[in-house]
Amino acid sequence: MAQTLYDPAIALSRFGLGASEQGAGEQGVSAIGDAQAVLLSEIAQGPPQPQGLAATPDLLAQVFAYQKEKRLARQAANAHDPNGPQKPGRDDNPVRPAVLAEMSARFDGTVTSPVIGFNERMTQFWANHFAVSTKKNQELAVSAGAFEREAIRPHVFGRFSDLLLAVETHPAMLLYLDNATSIGPDSPAASKGKSKDGAKRGLNENLAREIMELHTLGVGSGYTQTDVTTFAKVITGWSVARDNDRAAASGTFVFRAYAHEPGAQTILGKRYAEGGMEQGKAVLLDLARHPATAQHIATQLARYFVADDPPPELVTHLRETFIRTDGDLAEVSRALIASPESWSPQRVKMRSPLEYCCALIRASGVSPKPQAIEAALNAMGQPLWQPAGPNGFPDTVAAWNSPEGMATRMDVANSFADMLARRRPNADARALAQSLFGSQLSDATATAVARAETQSQGLALLFMSPEFMRR
Amino acid sequence: MLNRRHLIAGLGATAAFGGAIPALARASGARDPRLVVIVLRGAMDGLSAVPPVGDPDFSALRGAFPQGGDVKLNATFSLHPSLANFARQYQAGQALVVHAVASPYRDRSHFDGQDVLESGMTAPGHTESGWLNRALLALPGAQRANPKGLGIGGVTPLIIRGQAPVLGWAPSSLKPADADLPGRLQMLYGESDPMLAQTLKEAIDTGRIIGPNSMAGSYGGPGDPKTMEAMAQGAAKLLAQDDGPRIAALAFEGWDTHATEPQRLARQLQGLDAAYAAFETALGPVWKDTAILTVTEFGRTAAVNGTNGTDHGTATVALLTGGAVKGGRVISDWPGLKPAQLYQNRDLAPTTDLRSVAKGLLAGFYDIPESALAKDVFPDSATAKPMQGLIA
């Protein structure tokens, strides 16, 4: 195993986004040099931050304004008022341009700019760990990318408790898991009775449950239904400001004291005194420090990067590092890459469609339109920021190794081979195989590529080879 | 620059009159030739396309392949039954076969073989320009007035890439699809990744991926016979225009028949034959001024292999058809098929240099000096003399 520790080709496929033929200078594996140094510098620098994109309050304000326009137009139409406001056109909908801009900032930006991409892979890991879905409604569709930029990226190599607090107070998460409208049963808001539409408003446990089950402790780690319900009461009032809010600017986090459940609460045997928003922050801090959380995060990280059934000694090492450093994710990341167990030469993981797409973009050096990348991700079954539920996309081999997935990957591989052949008609698939896989290029793949009938067939074989499908 | 701008403006004026003003090249009553080169990527088996049924050693080598239905060309050679239009053109004296022909390349890599075939160099690694493009540059002034290059397909074939401007065109139905890929992946996964091999097998068994033994085709890729016909039709329409291009290159894929060759080659040759018919029909009145040369990077083994196919070889055929071709004959210095007569005891031996055919065609159509053909178009080819009398 010693000779594969910090092997640049393994660093690129297991911890990174794949070898890159983008831009000038050294290409492929040979661009790496000292893989350990590059990985450490990516941890030190943090993930790349997309520039020039609107912040969540602006994006939500645009959606609120659009929805209001539509509402007014509908009211005017219902009242048969010919001078009333007209229905806004499709071009006025702010969602689609925002989504495309977010995609471009990733696939023609943060995905292509890092040397190895450990920082970006970590971003993808945490964005999926704290999954939101653009499918929920227009508010989520417009802000899922901003959520990843604002709540995830700054904390990927920071302290887990800071990451957790940033995520659970972000408008996208509060809207996605319905906490924005959750009301304490004994709060002033509840005593005012029914809401405008007549529905009885009250407690919503959704976010509290998923924080415990998915974000921190993990399922089956010992918390009870009472803990969930109590925690839900603790975070009542954590909400998102709308136009008519006087307390905060539209589209920002707001703590609504009048919706907050009053009184002290007991969770996992510990009593939390009444303290407004501070009560919930105190619970989050304790959840972040809980040993079950350390075990949960350590297992997920090792499974995501190394193996579906990760080596127990690796999980133990990550868990202990997490506990010892009070959830310092830079230290946990350094422990992950310093463990010999992480560098097994066997490629036992399969690239997820998102990872596969990133690897294709870097390997081919082409920059497809965001619409084309979106279509490819949809076809392969991993639409960006659109998992079926708050548990995010699976990351096991069994989840992605399917006949359907193989068929769609072949279509996508063919498309990228075609795009590359058009962009660089002189591309030689044999040289590219060597450049991309370095020490990891197998004789079988080298031979298959060399025997291809055409260059684009050779490229498609390269993109479908075990070295490219797995990591 | 002033002169060139002037010339461009003049050409524009000609086009604006809808071709009512005769193009320069035809003002003298000279022929306005159309030259098409079709590259078959994958190494087309010349011994199946134009089988030497009269050679006493042929049936021992190729007995495993079904015979019959072939069109007799002469005492030695027949024509594959898929090539019905080519046979008709042959009988009309417009098509000919050059047999036991090869480029200077003697190894057996498709990539390198195609490089040499298309670059016109003597060794691989020169992929910056192709010989058809350098032929465009070498045309004398009067013939350069109109001829423009035309590259058909998603990627312009190397053979016509280079300094001379080249139009590009592809059928809108052309898709990046490759019928041969699943079979090759099966081999690769079979050697190196049992899990992916099993998944691919399930994908093929359930029809999600079209398997290598299916006759369903490559759905719109450059190896799909329907696409070959569409590419030919599109090229011919452009070549037929008064102010259109005059020298075109196409590339058809899917000729690497390592397994089940009889079925696969029959299908591919039908596509090629349909392309010949499409050219003839769509070129209409200018078919008489047309020559279509079909070439491939190398041939295949003389003997059938263990999977009812053939492996990479050396010499093969070049097919030439068109109203301007002096056809109705097979040109061959036949090397024979006895073991000692085969190249390295396995392949049909090359007795004709493919560059001689190409140079003969260029010399027959254009006033390019032989020195330019031997130096600029095909560097280091002085020993490969232009073949005489290809053009009627």
Image (cartoon, rainbow, N blue to C red):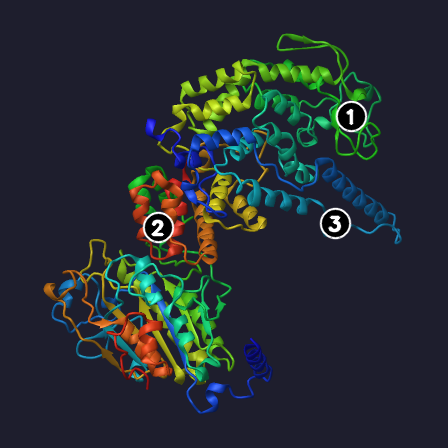
Percent of width and height locating residue A178:
69, 28
Residue type at the position of mark 1: Lys
Say which quarter of the image contains residue A35. Answer: top left
- Closer mark to the observer between disc 3 and disc 1: 3
Spatial separation of the CA atoms under disc 2 and disc 1: 67 Å
Mark 3 on the same chain as mark 1: yes
Quick check: marks 3 and 1 in contact, CB under 8 Å?
no
Which chain letter goes with mark 3? A
Residue at x 46% of width, y 24% of height: A336
Q: Which mark is residue A200?
A: 1
Residue bearing mark 2: A430
Mark 2 on the same chain as mark 3: yes
Choose the circle earlier in sequence order: 2 or 3: 3
Choose the circle earlier in sequence order: 2 or 1: 1
Q: Which mark is residue A165?
A: none
Which chain letter goes with mark 2? A
| Residue B39 relative to residue A136: left or right | left
Closer to us: B341 or B62: B341
Is any atom of residue B320 visible in this view? no
| Residue B69 relative to residue A151: left or right | left
In the picture shown, does residue A363 fall above or below B102?
Answer: above
| Residue A79 relative to residue B337: left or right | right
Percent of width and height locating residue A112:
52, 43
Residue at x 61% of width, y 36% of height: A49
Is any atom of residue A264 visible in this view? yes
Residue bearing mark 3: A92
In the picture shown, does residue A4 fall above or below A298?
Answer: below
| Image quadrant where one finds the N terminus of chain A | top left
